[in-house]
Image (tube, rainbow, N blue to C red):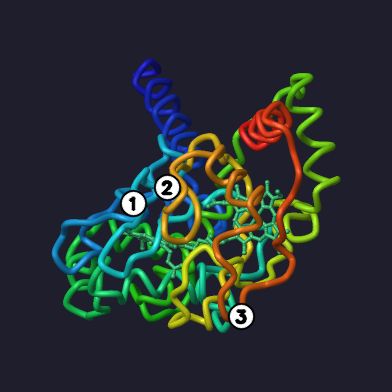
Amino acid sequence: MRRALLLGLICLGAAWLLGHAAAPPPPDTARVALGWRLLADRRLSVGRNFSCLDCHRPGQGYADGKPVATADGINTPTLYGLAERTTFGWFTPEVPSLEAFILRPLDNPREMGPLAEATLDRLRADPEARAAYAAAFPGAGQGITWERTAQALAAAIRTIPSPPTGALTPAAARGQTLFAEVGCGGCHQGATLSSEAYLNTGVSADLSRNGGKARVPSLIGLSQTAPYFHDGSAATLEEVVRFYQRGGNAPGPGVSRGVSPIVITDAELRDLVSYLSSL
Ligand code: HEC
Ligand code: HEC
């Protein structure tokens, strides 16, 4: 009898401990966890054929290794460093936030869209997904919505750590000095080496998007994110530096004067590439 009582107490204690261990995580943590699940969830695309991470591949610097992703003709940028950025997308200065940008691939028929309630109904029918949204957005609410989906995705993307950087090799250190000397830092500056400005460097002659003005990209994780430029037209970092060496492509209408020929030797070019590869 005594023994049964003791056993009962032990069971109660264990249940209490378990109950506490299973206490819900704070909403911020739950939101990030939900966001990571959604980044990999193909149910979010109308055709169930794409998740975010199918184009933003973790093993390829959150890019995809292709010149352009879709018939839109635009290169997939990395997702590194977005917590530090205030502008999003190659040609979309009007987009006010990361959350707002994320609705674009979800709505774009050439990516995952268009946005439809029927797509969200797949998640609404899944008890696990319902519980994950409820933990991430506690309190009275509207359940599973596109807005909350974008909020969770943005929360997860902001937690992506930048790749670790070691001490610079002598060549990379010389490249860093050159980077400043030849004026790269005029546009590539700050935490992610982007001024967040939009300008036309003459990469392509297509003026249809934002008057040809591309956002200065971040330079984080460059060694993983080839090919480069908004149209993927530079296959390697050496090609990028050669582009700047010759002062961009043939000057066209609206091309920024910030890009003009720079005089560097082949050895210096290699130093610059070493520096860019180390970022
Ligand atoms: C078919 C490939 C593809 C899929 C799927 C895709 N993306 Fe992208 N992503 C791109 C391309 C291409 C761009 C550049 C678009 C632009 O600049 O307008 C981009 C840009 C972005 C950016 C802006 C990055 C920056 O540097 O400003 C974010 C954030 C982003 N995508 C998040 C997502 C999320 C979240 C999903 C899933 C809901 C997703 N993407 C799905 C190809 C894709
Ligand atoms: C006048 C501003 C400006 C200057 C100066 C400048 N850049 Fe850029 N950089 C840009 C813009 C804008 C883009 C995007 C161009 C595009 O894709 O249309 C870019 C793109 C790049 C990219 C490609 C990144 C990617 O993810 O695709 C690299 C690498 C780069 N620049 C390195 C440099 C180096 C090295 C220098 C100095 C030799 C330099 N930049 C000077 C504005 C500038």
Q: Which amino acid type is marked by label 3?
A: Gly
Q: Which residue is mark 2?
A: 63
Q: Residues within 10 Å of mark 3 (few under 14, many from 20)?
A: some
Label 2 SS: loop
- The residue under label 1 is 55
Residue 254's disc is 3
Q: Is residue 210 above or below residue 55?
A: below
Ligand 2 lies under 8 Å from the Cβ of mark 2: yes
Marks 2/1: CA–CA distance: 6 Å
| Residue in front for this viewpoint, 215 or 106 | 215
Query: Who is closer to the viewer here, 76 or 256?
Result: 256
Please name the amino acid that badge 2 sits on: Ala
The CA distance from mark 3 to mark 1 is 31 Å
Q: Residues within 10 Å of mark 1 (few under 14, many from 20)?
A: some
Q: Earlier in the sequence, mark 3 or mark 1?
A: 1
**Are the residues flagged by discs 3 and 1 in contact, CB closer than 8 Å?**
no
The answer to the question of whether label 2 and label 1 lie on touching residues, with beta carbons closer than 8 A, is yes
Observer-nearest of 240 and 66: 240
**Quadrant containing the C terminus in the rendered view:** top right
Of labels 2 and 1, earlier in sequence is: 1
- Foreground label between 3 and 1: 3
